[in-house]
Amino acid sequence: MRNTLIIEGGAPLNGQVRVSGAKNAALVLVVASILADGETILDNVPRISDMEYLLQILNDIGVKTRWQDDSSLSICPPDGELKTRTSYELAKRLRASNLLLGAMLGRQGEAVVSLPGGCDIGSRPMDLHIKGVQALGAEVKLEHGYIYAHAKKPGGSRVYLDFPSVGATENIIMMAARTPGQSVIENAAKEPEIVDLANFLNSMGARIRGAGTDIIKIEGVEELRAGRYAIIPDRIEAGTYMIAAAISGGEILVENVIPTHLHPVVAKLQETGTIVEENDRGIIVRGTGRVKPVDIKTLPYPGFPTDMQSQMMALLSMAEGSSVIVENVFENRFQSVDELKRMGANIKVEGHTAVVEGVNRLHGARVRATDLRAGASLVLAALAADGCTEIEEAGHIFRGYENIETKLTSLGAKLK
Ligand code: EPZ
């Protein structure tokens, strides 16, 4: 992975940027493609390293994949069975490989999935995923860091999710789509990526109702017909560039967005005094100098997205007052704090709460990206900081932001 990103701060970012396909929809749709026989073509697939890792895992278990052009991907599972066991070496680099649990159970009633190692934002347990597939008839045992799941007689059932987990909802949908009988998920996640998964599977002949609400009903079907489908735009990438305009005092038109997916982010940005307008080409964001402090509570959709929390923290670190940020979704998602403090930010963390005292200016420093969105927050801070910032381990950023160097440079950022 390319390692260090060097950014000379101080230049306002102006112009327009086109948002790529949503990472968190593309990953699950590529996995869901193994539920259909024949060649699936997905359009608007972002070429990011998370996607490259996933394709290596799919190739390893016997699925042929091929990029048709910049963002169209062909996925072709074999006629026979797939290899049931994902390789630990490959799976440990990508937590989303855990989505093979539901897809493999739906396709061939068996899955051996590596328990994802912990990552920087939390322990990332799988208890709700396991509760879900067990309800649909899978026997599950955990051994040697693997989940062994086998469904001899799968049957539709009702599952209540203690927490509206995105991944658990997706795994249950994928297993239920090809499990005889009706399944109901209560307290399901409502993220737009869940709706995209349901629309994709329904376009192949699945019978899923209620995606986007907290009750999702699935009638299992025998088989699914492969087809062609375009992935929704990435609301988190869009939000990140919107904050780039606000933090640098520039004006950016963010194109190829679905405005409703961004309402929580738009509302919060407007509260900071940033000008945000929607038009038929996308969302225009204009920075108006020092922002007002605001309080943030991250919540499952449609609440403020946890994936935008670090980016907002960078913006609020130069607000004219103090902001309170409460991270309610992950237990350890304040990794960017120590790095932002190296740039002069004044932030105090108590458990799930961070109090951000706005300072006049941040200054460039050598910092380290610890995870994808913390890395994004350092890029944003570097754009506004005085002087030069060196972001080490920038590979984390390339996991989820397609062509970020080109996009930022075209907006006037000074990158090396
Ligand atoms: C998805 O992760 C996204 N990743 C994350 O985006 C996103 O932050 C998260 O949803 C929340 O929106 C993908 O879609 C690939 P969860 P996921 O299961 O499915 C707890 C990014 O930056 N939990 O909704 O892993 C868990 O510990 C990434 O793009 C259980 O307790 O998220 C966490 O605290 C980061 N038991 C909370 O739920 C379980 O069985 C949310 O996790 C599962 C989850």
Image (cartoon, helix red, strand yellow):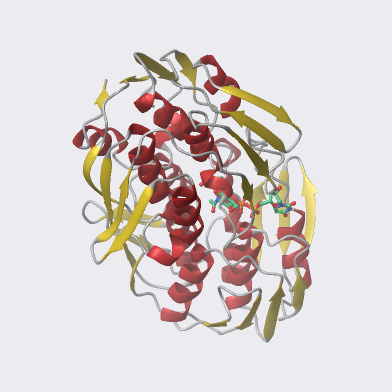
Residue at x 63%, y 58% (from the top left corner):
300
Q: Residue 169: image x %, image y %? A: 64, 65
Q: In this view, does 319 lie above or below 217?
A: above
Please give the count of numbered marks on the rendered protein: 0
| Residue 371 shown left or right of residue 135 in the figure | left
Specify the quadrant that holds the C terminus: top left
Residue at 52% over, 16% down: 344
Choose top left, top right, bottom left or bottom right for residue 63. Answer: bottom left
Q: Nearer the viewer, residue 81 or 32?
A: 32
Residue 92 drawn above or below residue 214? above
98 up-or-down from 194: above or below:
above
Residue 168 seen anywhere in this rendered image of the structure: yes
Say which of 110 and 106 sits in front. Answer: 106
The location of residue 369, given as percent across then percent down, is 50, 25
178 on left or right of 384: right
Residue at point 49% right, 63% down?
Answer: 193
Residue at 61%, 75% in the rendered image: 213
Q: In which quarter of the image is residue 135?
A: bottom right
Question: Residue 403: x, y in percent?
Answer: 28, 39
